[in-house]
Amino acid sequence: MAALLFWLMALALLIQGSQCSLGDIQVGCKSWEKKENGVCCNECHPGNHLVERCGLRPADLCKPCEPGTFTVNPLDNRCYPCNECIGAQVHVKSCTARADTVCRCIEGYHCENSECSRCQKNNQTTSKPLDNDSTEVPVDQVISRPPENTWTIFPVLIVGAILMTIFITFFIAAAVIIKKRGKKAKMQNPQFPIVRTPTDDPRTLIAIECSFHEAQQEQGTSTESLISK
């Protein structure tokens, strides 16, 4: 009997924990199913984010969003910062744990999307929104670019000129080097008659003796010519 009473009290606490509220926000898990070691949450109360999928108490599985944050998904594991109405936006409804801030545009402007996160001037042909972090460019300022498969000839001409300059420079340098090497080789090997030093070789001695006799014969012939005269 005591055990049954204990289980009834525990069940009452679970139900009370899941139904407790924070202001107009109910805290905890809205829909859950029993498991062997506790319960698993299928849906949090609106304005609550999921803390743990399964646990002992449904009230501990979901927690309400902090002030300045909200969530619309019953199984989101986090809350999102509330938006602010800026620029041409006018504040309509404050942010709550269950819904984001509601804004509208001032007269002469209209909402650009369903959330009205941006305002655009009426009869404006540009896609530039009126907010501070916009990076979009007006249509009349968009510069069209050529198709991706179009090959510009200007870079080809530049590359060709560079390659031609390198080739001509290399050719001139090679010609100068070859010319200098030729002059150096001529200076090292001058074309002079080779004078050999007499040696004891018999052939050298015979050549010297023949040269001596020829000189004497020429001298004798010259003397005889003078005598005959």
Image: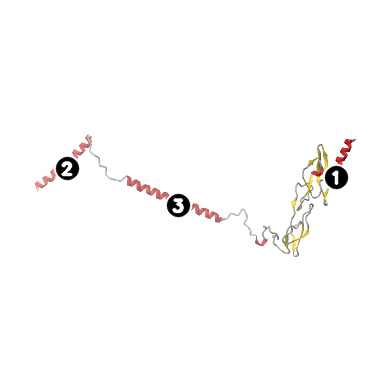
The circle on residue 184 is none
Instruction: Bin the neighbour count of mark 2 within 10 Å (Cα to Cα): few under 14, some 14-19, many 20 and up.
Output: few
Task: Find disc 1 in the rendering and name its residue.
Answer: 16
**Residue farthest along the right direction in this orientation:** 1
Q: Amino acid at mark 1?
A: Gln
* Callout 1: SS: helix
The Cα–Cα distance between marks 1 and 3, rounded to whole angstroms, is 92 Å
* Callout 3: SS: helix
Residue 123 drawn above or below residue 55: below
**Tags 1 and 3 in contact by the CB under 8 Å rule?**
no
Q: Amino acid at mark 2?
A: Ala
**Tags 1 and 2 in contact by the CB under 8 Å rule?**
no
**Mark 1 vs 2, N-terminal side:** 1
Which dot, 1 or 2, sits closer to the camera?
1
Residue at horizontal 37 percent and vertical 49 percent from the top: 180
Q: Nearer the viewer, residue 49 or 14?
A: 14
The circle on residue 169 is 3
Q: Amino acid at mark 3?
A: Thr
**Mark 2 vs 3, N-terminal side:** 3
**Mark 1 vs 3, N-terminal side:** 1
The Cα–Cα distance between marks 1 and 2, rounded to whole angstroms, is 150 Å
Instruction: Bin the neighbour count of mark 3 within 10 Å (Cα to Cα): few under 14, some 14-19, many 20 and up.
Output: few
Residue 148 in the image: x percent, y percent?
62, 53
Residue at horizontal 47 percent and vertical 51 percent from the top: 167
Task: Find disc 2 in the rendering and name its residue.
Answer: 215
